[in-house]
Image: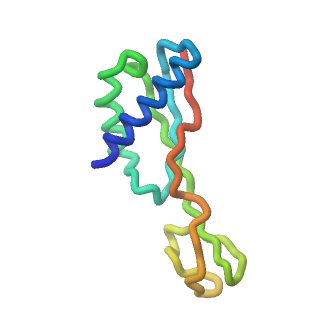
Amino acid sequence: MHELGVVFKVIDNLKEVAEENSIDKISRVTIGLGEVSTVIPEYLQDCFKWAKRKSPLVEECELEIETIPAVTYCEDCGETYPTVSFAKICPRCHSENTYLIQGNEFVIKEIEVP
């Protein structure tokens, strides 16, 4: 389960931001999570609930996850389409000459303090 490692990295990043801004508590963090990022939102939530008890900075922090839809671009017809529904094959022209343009991100979007 790599979600625990991801959570530790998020908390490390939050500690850095807190130090740079003289913050002693964070009440909410919003993560943008790509639909095909390989991070499972439920596991991420569970790991965060466990790990936040280890750090006074985030012990009362809520984790909000916003899904970033996966979108693929077809180089042959120039159209985009939802990746999860159609994978690598363009539903319009049936080309495999496609690539992911959005949806594998993992980003801290927002940090809220009391």
The residue at 56%/83% (across/down) is: 96
Farthest right residue? 78
Name the side, left or right, on which 9 lies relative to 92: left
Residue 47 coordinates in the image, percent (x, y) = 31, 37
The image shows residue 82, relative to residue 52, as above or below, that is below
Q: Front-most of 48 and 21?
A: 21
Q: Front-most of 79 and 97?
A: 97
The residue at 59%/59% (across/down) is: 102
The image shows residue 49, relative to residue 107, as above or below, that is above
Residue 42 coordinates in the image, percent (x, y) = 36, 45
Q: Front-most of 112 and 6?
A: 6
Name the side, left or right, on which 79 lies relative to 24: right
The residue at 35%/20% (across/down) is: 55
The image shows residue 56, relative to residue 12, as above or below, that is above
Farthest bottom residue? 94
Residue 37 coordinates in the image, percent (x, y) = 46, 56
The image shows residue 99, relative to residue 60, as above or below, that is below
Name the side, left or right, on which 81 lies relative to 84: right
Image quadrant occupied by the C terminus: top right
The residue at 37%/20% (across/down) is: 59
Q: Determine which quarter of the picture holds residue 50.
A: top left
